[in-house]
Amino acid sequence: MKTTNIMIVGVGGQGSLLASKLLGKLLTDEGYDVKVSEVHGMSQRGGSVVTYVRFGEKVYSPIITEGEADYIVSFEKLEAARWAPCLVEGGQIIVNTQEIDPMPVIIGAATYPSDILSELTAKGVKVDAVDALSLALQAGSAKAVNIVLMARLAKHFEIPYEKWIAAIESTVAPKFFELNRKAFEIGYYA
């Protein structure tokens, strides 16, 4: 069995670590050997955050290098562009269309690129762009962007919908389960 490599990328505070925990729980429950590695960067200051999730019959290292990621789940467009070189040929990026200005844009030293997604597509990258923030707000909270994005990723796997919901239930606090269940449903069927 081939090892599958997933990168979850975003900006500190967006919930990428919960997303990787959910994914790790689901895949372990499915009987895979799973390795998860979190690289925080300057997460407390809104900096780039990357999580690697690798699964298969036997996984020896948690790290994904350039040209190895089968999937990149990006919580923000600029992060999708930053990490795109890590994709395998024919790999899939699932990207939230939200834009979060990095410090050079905030201080006026740079401008946010306007054509990130079209540039990725022009390079042959398969892009599934979704306004995950709007869908999360529809579910009841902007903090559910991570679950909306996991729902989009779920569509690329043959793991039944109900098992994803069970993994959410065992990963999030009970008081947040219904919100996250709804966010997953909205993201999955959008």
Image (cartoon, rainbow, N blue to C red):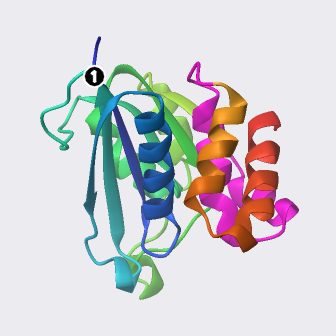
Vertical relation: 88 (above or below) 54: above
Vertical relation: 53 (above or below) 71: below
Amino acid on which the number 1 mark rests in the picture: Thr
- State the residue in front, 174 or 127: 174
Mark 1, other Cα within 10 Å: few <14 / some 14–19 / many ≥20: some
Q: Is residue 82 left or right of residue 155?
A: left
Q: x and y percent of residue 46 in the render? A: 41, 79
What is the magenta segment's predominant secondary structure? helix
- State the residue in front, 114 or 181: 181
Instruction: Check disc 1 and report the residue beneath it.
Output: 3
- Which quadrant holds the C terminus? top right
Q: Is residue 1 left or right of residue 23?
A: left
- Which quadrant holds the N terminus? top left
145 within the magenta span: yes
**Which residue ends up furthest to the top in the rendered image?**
1
**Which residue ends up furthest to the left in the rendered image?**
60
The magenta stretch is: 130-159
Residue drawn where x is 52% and y is 66% of the image: 15
Q: Quadrant of residue 179?
A: bottom right
Residue drawn where x is 27% and y is 20% of the image: 57
Q: Is residue 156 left or right of residue 104?
A: right
Q: x and y percent of residue 123 in the render? A: 41, 26
164 within the magenta span: no
Mark 1 element type: loop
Q: x and y percent of residue 131 in the render? A: 72, 52
Residue drawn where x is 65% and y is 60% of the image: 145
Q: Is residue 156 left or right of residue 46?
A: right
Q: Is residue 23 visible?
A: yes
Vertical relation: 121 (above or below) 46: above
Residue drawn where x is 47% and y is 60% of the image: 16
